[in-house]
Image: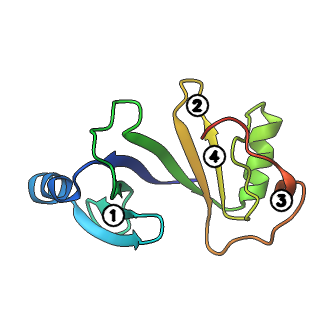
């Protein structure tokens, strides 16, 4: 398993860039605008290839986020998302967002911190029982 990123929601993208880049010294590693969904993902790191801070900017957000909704999740890549989720289930961990797509899954810690697992490399072929599993709770 490899730590990938931590996601935080930001109300003002330009202020956040000023803080993280100009003040802290992080560098932009990638940016993606999602026109249809109306949000931007901006990834920052101390250097290319290092774990990142993912800034999520929802274009229509007018009010400041509270302390529970501004932090998003921790993210880790895994060699085989199906095997990893099965191992977690075998240990009694509830998979809240199963890897139906062969690429992504979510769980929560006992303190309700959301953790995302992403398949390393290409998505795996879609297989059962994962393909039919429903989401449980929120992630």
Q: Residue at x 78, y 30 (%)?
A: 92
Query: On the rendered structure, is 59 left or right of 93?
Result: left
Which residue in the structure is indicated by mark 2? Answer: 109
Query: On the rendered structure, is 22 left or right of 9?
Result: left
Where does the image place residue 34, in percent across and percent down from the top left?
A: 43, 70
Figure colour scheme? rainbow
Q: How busy is the neighbourhood of tag 3: few (under 14 within 10 Å), some, or many (20 plus)?
A: some
Which residue in the structure is indicated by mark 1? Answer: 42
Q: CA distance from mark 4 to mark 1?
A: 21 Å
Which residue in the structure is indicated by mark 3? Answer: 131
Say whether marks 3 and 1 touch (CB < 8 Å). no
Which residue in the structure is indicated by mark 4? Answer: 106
Q: CA distance from mark 1 to mark 2?
A: 25 Å
Q: Residue at x 90, y 59 (%)?
A: 128
Q: CA distance from mark 4 to mark 3?
A: 15 Å
Say whether marks 4 and 1 touch (CB < 8 Å). no
């Amino acid at each position: 398993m490899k730590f990938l990123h931590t996601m935080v929601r930001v109300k003002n993208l330009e202020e956040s860039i000023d803080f993280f880049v100009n003040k802290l010294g992080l560098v932009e590693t990638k940016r993606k605008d999602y026109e249809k969904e109306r949000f931007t993902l901006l990834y920052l790191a101390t250097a290319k290839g290092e774990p990142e801070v993912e800034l999520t900017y929802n274009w229509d957000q007018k009010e400041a986020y509270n302390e529970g909704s501004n932090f998003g999740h921790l993210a880790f890549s895994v060699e085989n998302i199906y095997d990893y989720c099965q191992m977690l289930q075998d240990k009694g961990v509830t998979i809240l967002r199963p890897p139906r797509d062969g690429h992504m899954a979510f769980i929560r810690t006992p303190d309700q911190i959301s953790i995302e697992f992403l398949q390393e490399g290409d998505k795996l072929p879609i297989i059962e029982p994962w393909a039919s599993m429903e989401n449980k709770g929120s992630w």
